[in-house]
Image: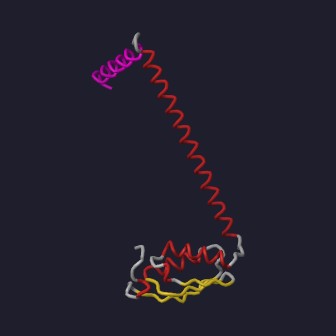
Amino acid sequence: MNKRGKLISALLAGAGLMYLLDPERGARRRALVRDKAIRARHKLSDGFGATTRDLKNRAGGRLAELRSRWRQEDVDDEILHERIRSAVGRVVSHTGAIEVDVLGGRVTLRGPVLQGELDDLLGAVGRVAGVREVTNELEVHPSVDVPPLQGGGRR
């Protein structure tokens, strides 16, 4: 640091000390600085605690997800049907056009679907817990030129 920088630093440090050690208002100013430091420490501690809980919960979720992949579970067809409808709703713009039949973990998909959504749809249904087999009886269309695919879409 050059001489000018040292001089400016010394002047600022002196002004800060004068501000905090002022006989009339110095005690109040020191208390404000102390209170702000305590608040900052508490906020940092709270943030660290929240981050720790978040990471712990995410790790627990990933672990449960991994366990469920290794375990083949028998799922009631009605529950599996609802899981599949939920998955379909996340990847297809015209969910009402897709018919889902479930029997013993075997899924049959029927109805019109857009060509660009087919791979995402089949992948999403195949990843649903409890699905053993997916039969594709879908009618693939390049655009929304079919009445069931017109209007009402979310995309």
Q: Residue at x 55, y 87 (%)?
A: 136
15 left or right, relative to 102 = left
> In the rendering, at what x and y percent does residue 147 appear?
41, 87
Residue 9 highlighted magenta (yes or no): yes
Q: Is residue 33 above or below residue 122?
A: above
Q: How is the image coloured?
A: secondary structure
Is residue 37 rendered magenta in the image? no
Residue 105 lies, in percent from the top left, at 67, 81
Q: Main secondary structure of the magenta part?
A: helix
The segment highlighted magenta reads 1-21
Q: Nearer the viewer, residue 72 or 4?
A: 72
What is the x, y in percent for residue 92?
47, 77
Look at the picture and state if 45 lies above or below 104.
above
Q: Quadrant of the C terminus?
A: bottom left
Q: Is residue 22 left or right of residue 76?
A: left
Q: Could you say where residue 84 lies in the image, as x and y percent from the top left?
A: 58, 76
* Residue sitting at the far top: 23
Position of the N terminus by quadrant: top left
Residue 23 position by quadrant? top left
Image height check: is 53 above or below 85? above
Residue under the point 42% across and 77% down: 152
Task: Give the vertical position of 5 relative to 75 (above or below).
Answer: above
Residue under the point 29% across and 21% down: 3
Left or right of 43, for residue 20: left
Residue at horizontal 42%, vertical 76%? Answer: 153
Quick one: 85 or 134, which is closer to the camera?
85
